[in-house]
Image (tube, coloured by chain):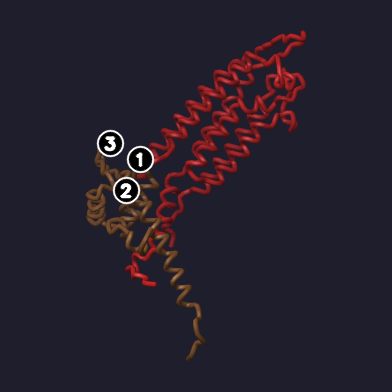
Amino acid sequence: MNVQPVPADDGPQRLLAESRQLARRVRAAQRAPWAPLLVLSAVTFAAVPVYRYGRYALTCRTYDGGGRVCLVSNTATLVYWPIALVLAYVAIAAFYLHRARARGVGTRVLPVAGIGILIAAVTGGAAAWLATHPPVGGFLALRFASGQAGWVFGVVSPAFAIGLGLLALAVVERSRALALLSLGYLVFAMVPGNDLGWVIRHPSPWAQVPRLVIGGSVLLVAGLLFAWVQRPVRRDRP
Amino acid sequence: MTGHPANGLDDVVHQRVRLGILTIAHEARRVEFGYLRDSLELTAGNLSQHLGVLERAGLITIDKGYAGRRARTWISLTRAGRSALRAEIDQLKALITQVDAARDRSTRPEEPATE
């Protein structure tokens, strides 16, 4: 076989290796998952007074058999979360754009912010609809009646919206650590609080506070860990 | 593809610095002149020459603007640039595979070795 010589400096293995290394450096310069984690943690902690002091409404619907399905909902949180999450994603996008300009590399955060806002709108709308339209027939109503429909509230919960947004960011940033954290957070959002024994039962105004504190703390600790891992390394030591 | 993979290499792209520029621009979507200069450890003049070659080949676009009072130059890949980069990477991988296969054949003992 005739193997054509290639200049030593431009050898294919070396070129490929350098190319991969440059790509890795760009990705490292673009990544800043600690910022969204800290922003979303702040949004979660800020929700505590909204849950504690917001007005609770009881919505009941009667189904054909004569029974009733009632849901307790906090109207303030139905307003708080969509607005807070949209503002959070706007702040995250602004941070990434500013950082990208300062570092001289582009950013892929805008699609993530768009997806995050869309998820916030969909889950917020679904939560509002569910609060005003408790299911009165079919499989879902039976699950509600037997108290086994916690996963429905999990899917429309703000924590689930946050987990999905973080998962989108993990895909864009190609970060396995962030993907694992997002998946864990989605599981946390789906598991009904009382299954794990950390929810104070309704009608206490403190009912959701433990879940918020745990969720906010997870995001805060993860954000601080990512920031610590990504801290600038001093190169001026002898 | 027919023929040796080296025949498919594009002379514009198959060069250490220009491949680096395309790789960074692809990964970053948009990259500033200063980042390229620092990452590739080039002088501004040298980098400008390579950028000129890539721009004339239609593989990148160069946008000049200001960030505050500071002049900034941003480089982005064109569609042709993305295709050229992908083709170069594929050719390099094929070349490595072929060279490795040739090396394996040449090191395989065909007859008893004599000293």
The picture quadrant where one finds residue B78 is top left
Using the image, tell me which numbered label, if any, was put on residue A101.
1
Distance, label 1 to label 2, CA atoms, is 23 Å
In the rendered view of the protein, which quadrant contains the C terminus of chain A?
A: bottom left
- Among the 4 quarters of the image, the one containing residue B2: bottom left
**Colour-to-chain, brown:** B
Of the numbered discs in the image, which one, if any, rests on residue B81? 2
Q: Chain of mark 3?
A: B
Q: Camera-side residue: A124 or A66? A: A66
Label 1–label 2 contact, CB within 8 A: no
Observer-side mark, 3 or 2, equals 2
**Chain ID, mark 1:** A
The picture's colour for chain A is red
Question: In the drawing, what numbered circle is on residue B68?
Answer: 3
Q: Quadrant of the N terminus of chain A?
A: bottom left
Crowding at label 3, few (<14), some or many (≥20) Cα neighbours within 10 Å?
A: few
Point out residue A96 in the picture as x, y percentages from the top left corner.
42, 37
User: Residues under labels 3 and 2: Cα distance?
Assistant: 30 Å
Determine the chain carrying the residue at label 2.
Answer: B
Q: Earlier in the sequence, mark 3 or mark 2?
A: 3
Specify the amino acid type for callout 1: Arg
